[in-house]
């Protein structure tokens, strides 16, 4: 009698991570574009450092990058894999379905770390902004929390929309207003009402988390509210994305 050893969940997840890393590398143009946009903001907003402060500029640039990764890059990668039947084939294998999506999300979290580090290095080289090691560690932590908002939003988009072309179009339609209204509104360039709305929007919450990480001495009760809003936005978007996500296009 022949017996087959079923791979452990860890082995399955490790194999999926390796495969997803290859996929991201082959489609690295979309990832690179999500790095380019925040770097453009960093370069073009050099004059804002003196007016709004270094923390505001860095928080804005990293938040822009998070939107690019979570709303522009991630849902397009998932939509393409779904159209190619990748998920359908994986689900026929004796592996837990949740590992398929967790693997992709973990890869995106690594991408978020890389983007955040690029912004910090760029801020130091371009604007001579010195960031203490404590703040670097905090940024790497809160960037994952803030990034989870937009990854969940990207999951909601790909959950509600089937075809990759439609996902690409809707993702752009959602991402660019978030980026430009968020950045300009947070700077107060669109009026006080918009500034207040942006402050409690997903973009503003992400930006606030980054700024708190850069200035731990400013932590107060508002940080608790920001963290609660992070959980609320992430849970809301994730519920939509999980509830209506289809593994294959019928």
Image: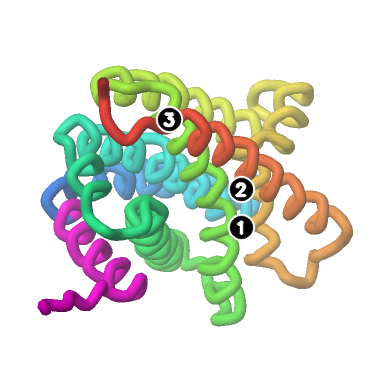
Asked which quadrant contains residue 213, the reply is bottom right
Q: Which mark is residue 210?
A: 1
Helix, strand or loop for the magenta stretch, by majority: helix
Position of 204 compared to 73: left or right? Answer: right
Residue that mark 2 sits on: 206
Q: For the residues carrying marks 2 and 3, which lies nearer the camera in this image?
A: 3
Name the residue at 53% across, 29% down.
Answer: 178
Where, quadrant-wise, is the C terminus in this rendering? top left
Across and down, in percent, residue 113 comes to 41, 64
Q: Earlier in the sequence, mark 1 or mark 3?
A: 3
Q: Position of residue 71 (x, y in %)?
A: 42, 36
Residue 109 falls left or right of residue 132: left
SS at badge 1: helix
The answer to which of 86 and 225 lies nearer the viewer is 86
Magenta residue check for 13: yes
**Residue holding disc 3:** 159
User: Is the residue 85 above or below the residue 194 in the image?
Assistant: below
Camera-nearest label, 1 or 3: 3
Residue 96 on the magenta span: no
Q: Which residues are magenta?
A: 1-24
Residue at position x 63%, y 66% from top? 214
- The image's mark for residue 12 is none
Q: Which circle's residue, 2 or 3, is located before the other in the chain? A: 3
User: Residue 245 occupies which quadrant of the picture?
Assistant: top left
C-alpha span from label 2 to label 3:
23 Å
């Amino acid at each position: 009698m022949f017996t087959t050893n079923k791979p452990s969940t860890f082995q399955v997840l490790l194999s999926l991570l390796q495969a997803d890393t290859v996929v991201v590398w082959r489609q690295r143009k979309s990832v690179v574009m999500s790095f380019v946009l925040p770097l453009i903001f960093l370069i073009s907003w050099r004059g804002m450092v003196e007016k709004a402060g270094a923390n505001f500029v860095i928080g804005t640039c990293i938040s822009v990058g998070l939107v690019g990764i979570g709303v522009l890059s991630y849902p397009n990668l998932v939509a393409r894999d779904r159209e190619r039947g990748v998920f359908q084939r994986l689900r026929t294998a004796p592996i837990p379905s949740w590992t398929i999506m967790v693997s992709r999300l973990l890869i995106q979290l690594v991408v978020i770390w890389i983007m955040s580090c690029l912004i910090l290095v760029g801020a130091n080289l371009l604007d001579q902004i010195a960031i203490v090691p404590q703040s670097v560690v905090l940024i790497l932590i809160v960037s994952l929390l803030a990034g989870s908002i937009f990854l969940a939003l990207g999951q909601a988009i790909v959950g509600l929309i089937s075809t990759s072309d439609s996902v690409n179009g809707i993702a752009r339609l959602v991402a660019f207003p978030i980026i430009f209204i968020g950045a300009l509104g947070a700077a107060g360039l669109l009026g006080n009402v918009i500034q207040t709305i942006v402050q409690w929007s997903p973009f503003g919450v992400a930006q606030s988390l980054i700024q708190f990480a850069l200035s731990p001495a400013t932590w107060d009760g508002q940080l608790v509210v920001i963290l609660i809003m992070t959980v609320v936005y992430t849970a809301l978007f994730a519920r939509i994305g999980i509830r209506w996500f289809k593994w294959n296009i019928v």
